[in-house]
Amino acid sequence: MAELAYLDNAATSFPKPEAVHEAVDRVARRCAVNPGRGGSELAHEAGELVDGLRRRLHVFFGNPAADSARLVFAANATDALNTAIAGVCGPGDHVVSTRLEHNSVLRPLWELERRGVLTHTLVPGDGAGFIDPADVAAALTPSTRLVILNHASNVLGTIQDAAAVGRMCREHGVLFLLDASQSAGLIPVDMDAFGVDLLAFTGHKGLMGPMGTGGLAVGPDVAVDPTRWGGTGVRSAHRGHLEQYPWRLEAGTLNLPGLAGLAAGLTWIEQSGPAVLLAEERRLAANLISGIEALGGVRTWCAGADERHLAVVSVTVDGMESDEVGTRLDVDHDVIARTGLQCAPLVHEDLGTVDVRGTVRFGIGPFNTDEHILRTLAGLGECAEAARSRRG
Ligand SMILES: Cc1ncc(COP(=O)(O)O)c(C=O)c1O
């Protein structure tokens, strides 16, 4: 079997740097005990690991006016987004978000609207995968409490102007929640510079950490009410859950080996240089896009390899459903892509790609090579040819 060409890094980065595996293994064997629960040396070591990473991510995401305790860990970005949305919105509140969002934003909004907790408006993209901040401003109402923006589309790779949306939110006194699931670790995500009040991130994509890691960074002037209550390891006699961060939003046992891996992933990207990693991924994306244009019969959707795009390329093959393209790439070429709606159904409704069962998405990562792209192009060429011959 040829070496696997894993091009689904927008779902989760794979493989991870060796240092990530080593850190997970080392901590699982050495000090995977509950931090803060008990005064043992091991509990202290575990606590240092968690708080050290907390401080590093707090700086990494540019939240200097807040206490680093306001960076709380979560199971993933979905968990963090749910905590943020349900934790700041109450009855009568209105939320503005976009049609480029992932289901981890859309479904909480739909569910909370169904329960009568909030109402919301979804701003459409401009047809090229970008949100015009003026459209977000136009959707605000006197009851708008929160604006939620997907920093980079997981279907199209398009990067939004988060700073412009943040400025607009500040002017209108509205909270700004940024979903940095795709962007964190690849492009600067700076809460202070962008005017972000709440930042949701995941650890297992661009930050190169293990699955089951992520978090929410909370700005200095934001009150997020807990949506879960439970053990914190401190002041256990109290009947109420702790109001102080991080315990306020962190209940239960953390994924310590996972967080050790995330710390190693962060070190790896800092040493490699996010800009260097992204430049190489964009070079491969540019080759993929130009190769596709030369093939004929394969269409890219809002693709680009410039500074407004991450290395995420969605395609369709004329006359062949995306599932079949994905299967042919996998079975015949050992190329792994992501087919379907990629948990962002409204993007596909707007592109008109629902009828062909979504797109085939290539998410290029730091371990992809020129050979992976050439193999992908060969596979797409075969699909286009098969579809042509079927049509006769
Ligand atoms: C834009 C975006 N938001 C949120 C998520 C959810 O991330 P997680 O799977 O870590 O919950 C993803 C994952 O695909 C995503 O791409």
Image (spheres, rainbow, N blue to C red):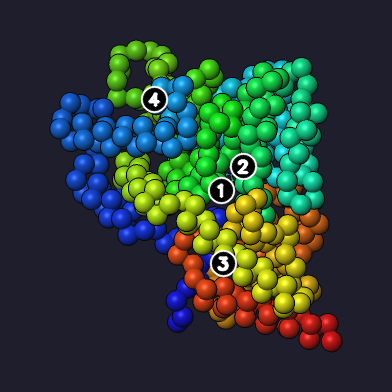
Q: How far apart are marks 4 and 1 (CA)?
A: 24 Å
Q: Describe residue 71's horizontal placement relative to residue 34 as left or right.
A: right
Give the alpha-carbon distance from disc 3 to disc 4, as whole Å: 39 Å
Question: Mark 4 sits on what residue?
Answer: 69
Earlier along the polypeptide chain: callout 1 or callout 2?
2
Query: What type is the residue that disc 4 sits on?
Result: Ala
Between label 3 and label 2, give the one nearer the viewer.
3
Front position in the image: 222 or 56: 56
Quadrant position of residue 196: top right
Among numbered discs 3 and 4, the one appearing first in the sequence: 4
Q: Which residue is depicted at the point 53% across and 17% down?
A: 221
Residue 16 found in image quarter? bottom left
Distance (Cα) linking label 1 and label 2: 7 Å
Q: Is residue 35 left or right of residue 333?
A: left
CA distance separating discs 4 and 2: 24 Å
Do the residues under discs 4 and 2 have CB atoms within 8 angstroms? no
Query: Which residue is tagged 1?
Result: 182
Quick check: is the Cβ at mark 2 less than 8 Å away from ligand 1? yes
Residue at the farthest left position: 41
> Which residue bears the numbered disc 3?
284
Residue count near mark 4 (Cα–Cα under 10 Å), binned few <14, some 14–19, many ≥20: some
**196 versus 101 height, above or below:** above
Give the number of the disc on residue 151. Answer: 2
Mark 2 and mark 1 in contact (Cβ < 8 Å)? yes
Q: Residue 231 lies in what quarter of the image?
A: top left
Disc 4 secondary structure class:
helix
